[in-house]
Image: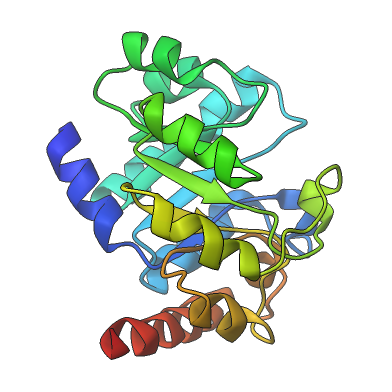
Amino acid sequence: MDREKRLEILQEIDIYPVTCEELSEGRDNIRVLEDVLAGGAKIVQLREKNWSKKQLYQVALEFKKRTQGCGALLMINDHVDVALAAGADGVHLGRSDLPLPAARSIAPELILGASSHSLEQALEAEQAGADYVNIGPVFSTQTKENNAPLGEEAIKSIAPELDIPFTVMGGINTENISRVLEAGARRIAMVSGITRAPDMEKRVRELREKILEYRQQA
């Protein structure tokens, strides 16, 4: 898949599942991947903060086979080298990861996403060449314990200033997703709201339907 096609799919994504085996009720990441793809997700991020690069790479190879087979994007969290080696479609960079210009210099065809916790950081990432930014954490979450929740009001203040797509993440679930959708979000990244669901495929379908409702109102 070339960069143009990757960016085309990025524009259309709705739910953005992110892995975390510790929060998957005993199910491994391959099972999570199978279910979210069956639910219609068009992007998935392999994110395991405590894994070695070798382990990430080995799982990423299997992820790539399956995402490629259904036209979905595979994003790797943090590691540009793992993304390139596994043939992934992109990498999501945190604030302490390789700077965006450096990542772009070695991975010109990949989608580059960037974490942001404020308007200043979001604009900085956009200017540095990010293809999308993530705004978060919106609510309190186990996966972003070091960052204070921004609240859905941050979406209203940050989103209008951006010229690139944005995702939102952090503590979003079936009970509060309407709040972020009402604030203007249309691409929702989620870990435990999906991985802890008894039926992950059904959960992804339900979330996608909810997002579509708001997209159709625009």
* Residue in the image at 41% along x and 70% along y: 186
Using residue 172 as the reference point, say whether residue 156 is left or right of it: left
Q: Is residue 199 visible?
A: no
Horizontal and vertical percent position of residue 68: 27, 45
Task: State the residue at coordinates (73%, 33%).
Answer: 49
Q: Is residue 110 left or right of residue 37?
A: left
Colour scheme shown:
rainbow
Q: Is residue 114 above or below residue 214?
A: above
| Image coordinates for residue 202, horizontal then vertical, percent | 51, 83
In depth, the one of 193 and 157 nearer the eye is 157
In this picture, residue 124 sits left or right of residue 86: right
For this rendering, which residue is in front, 86 or 90?
90
Res 102 quadrant in image: top left
Labels in figure, total:
0
Quadrant of the snapshot with the C terminus: bottom left
Residue at (40% x, 64% y) in the render: 37
Q: Is residue 155 visible?
A: yes
Identify the residue shown where x is 68% and y is 38%.
48
Quadrant assignment for the N terminus: top left
Q: Position of residue 192 (x, y in %)?
A: 71, 65
